[in-house]
Image (cartoon, rainbow, N blue to C red):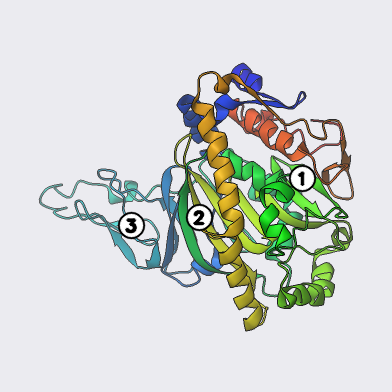
Amino acid sequence: MNRGMHELVDADRGVVSRRIFIEPEIYQQELKQIFARCWLFLCHDSQIPLPGDFFTTYMGEDPVLVIRDNDGQVHAFLNVCRHRGNRLCRADSGNAASFTCAYHGWTYRNDGRLTGVPYLREAYHNELDRERWGLIPVALLGNYKGLWFATFDSEAPPLHEYLGEMAWYLDNFVDRREGRIEILGMHRWVIPCNWKFPAENFGGDAYHVPWSHLSAVTTSFSTGATAKRNATGTMVSPGNGHVVICIGPEMSGEPPADKLLDYDWATRPEVNTRLGPRSALVNPIVATVFPNFSLLRATSRTFRVWHPRGPDKTEVWSWVFMDKAAPPEIKKAIRLAGARGFGPSGTFEQDDMDNWQECTRTGRGVISRQMLLNTQMGLGHDRFDPALGAWASEYRYSESNHRHFYCRWSEMMSGAPWNEVVDHSASENDHV
């Protein structure tokens, strides 16, 4: 497995096999080696603010129930009844003191304990050990500034180590102002594409903007921050497969709406104070936390999870986020920009979905599947920048982030234990 995966991704040469986007066997290995081992995003604090609040989601294809119990402690369990494996909670979110399975009526408290079993005395003769049959918890659960993550792997590094330098780049999205962020609603839709195409796109593909989104840019629907000829910026790889698109600190990625542009510049002093000296070097606007959690602060403010649903299908869960301290008129403007640009029928979203769909569909061919994909843009033209705590490209368009993303994918797919997983982007002495 190790040797085979490294043959599919050659970061040194900048080539990737198309097999990793279409073959069912490789997809099944991803579920085991990546989605069952990495830290995955679950939800935001504001989605479960009160005791009893819950939110249902997925880690890979495993259904998960996130609950704040009656004492205010947050848990995450497999959303599966221990009796026959039926889905326990069918609601997307809500508030409940307990959950009862629709099949045979087993009931669990919101702290995961099994409390109710029909005919326990008569049918089980009081011999069922209910303490042993509570809900299955995730191995590790962690919170970073309101973002809840979990992993099924008890050997995984702590969340702060997994994020590493990526934590500061996350702050640019979720901790810009006092009170941090709040989220609004959720859109869900399915794209007939492999999950890695949108994950890599959000983490490193500024190259497509002046071409795929040409109509939106030329009609001034968007500022097209990465498309301007005089734009500055860099691709940044902070380690562990996490990847970020940054524009220059003198630029704004907001939509061409006076309210939002004025708000961006008016809040910059507070933002820069909170973020520190590094904010004078780069302005992160799009990012992917490996493997499938992406954030966007350009044209719209959205974060989303690319839930895998097979080698050629991705279910997108997308939320609009905004500074909690923003005035009502700014929150409204952000909401409208999100729906117009990056909702399921948004101008930018439609362009992107068409590309990802066709990149996946053509991989079904026997001959076309043998073709290697080229990720050589900027090969040999990136360097480790201590001030950024990351590898950075020399030019604002580069596929350096693609190479770091797929190198991490290959390392995880090798099945090596965590202490042997090589991180090619965290050290100045390693180069991809």
**Residue linked to disc 2:** 317
Q: Position of residue 244 (x, y in %)?
A: 74, 49
Q: Nearer the viewer, residue 24 or 118?
A: 24
Mark 3–mark 1 distance (CA, rounded to whole Å): 37 Å
Q: Is residue 34 visible?
A: no
Left or right of 156, for residue 49: left
Q: Secondary structure at mark 1?
A: strand
Q: Secondary structure at mark 3?
A: loop
Relative to 208, residue 324 above or below: below
Type of amino acid at the residue the image marks with label 2: Trp
Q: Tell me what residue is drawn at x 40 percent, y 47 percent.
A: 136
**Residue linked to disc 1:** 238
Q: Of all residues shown, which one is farthest toward the bottom? A: 328
Q: Of all residues shown, which one is farthest toward the left? A: 122
Q: Quadrant of residue 7?
A: top right
In the rendered image, the quadrant that contains the C terminus is top right
Q: Position of residue 76 (x, y in %)?
A: 46, 54
**Residue linked to disc 3:** 89
Type of amino acid at the residue the image marks with label 1: Pro
Q: Secondary structure at mark 2?
A: strand
